[in-house]
Amino acid sequence: MLTIKDWAEDDRPREKLVNKGITALSDAELLAILIATGTQNETAVGLAKSVLALTANNLNELGRCSIKDLQKIKGIGPAKAINIIAALELGRRRKQAEILERSSVRSSAEIAQLFQGKIADLPHEEFWILLLNSSLKIIDTQRVAQGGVGEVATDMRLIMKPAVDKLAAAIAVVHNHPSGNVQPSVQDRELTKNIAKAAAIFKIKFIDHIIVSDSAYYSFADKDGLE
C-alpha cells in the first residue's frame, strides 16, 4: 500500500506546510495533519477527504458534527474526532477574540460576526446578550437561554439581570436559527418589543436584536427599527 511516507516530500502535508506555507494546503491536507495517521487501507489524507464528504466539503457544516458523527467514518476513532472538534472550536474562538479586541461596536454586521463564530452552526437555538458601555465598547457577552427563546419571552428578568449586574448602558441580543432561515418569527418580533420596553424601564439603550445563521443575519434595527 502507498502511504504518505512514500509520497514526494513536497506532497506530504506537514512537509508541504513547512516548505510552501499553510495557504498551499487544501482543507483535506489540513485535516490530515490533525488526523495524523491513516489506517492499513487508507492514508490520513484519504480519511480527511471522507470527513469532508460528510458535509459536502462545507466547513461550517463540519462544525456542527459531534464526536459520534465523525466516528461513523471507518478509521476515525475518539482521539482523531476530538482533535478535529477541538481545532474547529479554536477557529470559532479566534474569530470571536478578534472582534472582542475592537474598541467598540459600530454596526449590526459586527455584532452578527461576533456571534456567528459562536452560535451560528449549533444544532439548537441559543439566546445571548451583548453588554456595552456608554461608548458602545464591549463589556461582556452572556448566554441567556439554550434550546429555544420561548422561555425567555415570558421572563424579561433573565435578559435584564446581566445588564443590570454589569451596569451596562446599552445592550443587543442575538440568537441563532439552526434551520439557516434568518427571517424572524412572530415570537421573535414579540420578544423584541418586550425587550425594548424592559430596557426602557431601566434606561438602558437597546440597540439591536439579531438573528444569525452560518452565512446570513437579520437585524431588527436595520430592517424594522426598535421603536
Image (tube, rainbow, N blue to C red):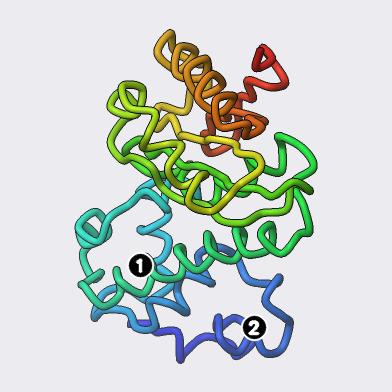
The residue that appears at 53% across and 35% down in the rendered structure is 173
- x then y, percent, for residue 143: 41, 47
Is tag 2's residue or tag 1's residue first in the polypeptide sequence?
2
Establish if 1 lies above or below 124: below
Task: Looking at the picture, tell me which residue is in the foreground, 100 or 46.
Answer: 100
Question: How dense is the environment of label 1, judged by Cα within 10 Å: few (below 14), some, or many (20 and up)?
Answer: many
- x then y, percent, for residue 160: 46, 37
**Secondary structure at numbered mark 1:** helix
Residue 47 tag number: 1
Task: Looking at the picture, tell me which residue is in the foreground, 209 or 8.
Answer: 209
Question: How dense is the environment of label 2, judged by Cα within 10 Å: few (below 14), some, or many (20 and up)?
Answer: some
- x then y, percent, for residue 33: 47, 79
**Secondary structure at numbered mark 2:** helix
Establish if 119 lies above or below 153: below
Tell me the quarter of the picture where residue 222 sits: top right
What is the spatial separation of the Cα atoms under label 2 and label 1, in whole angstroms?
19 Å
Residue 17 tag number: 2
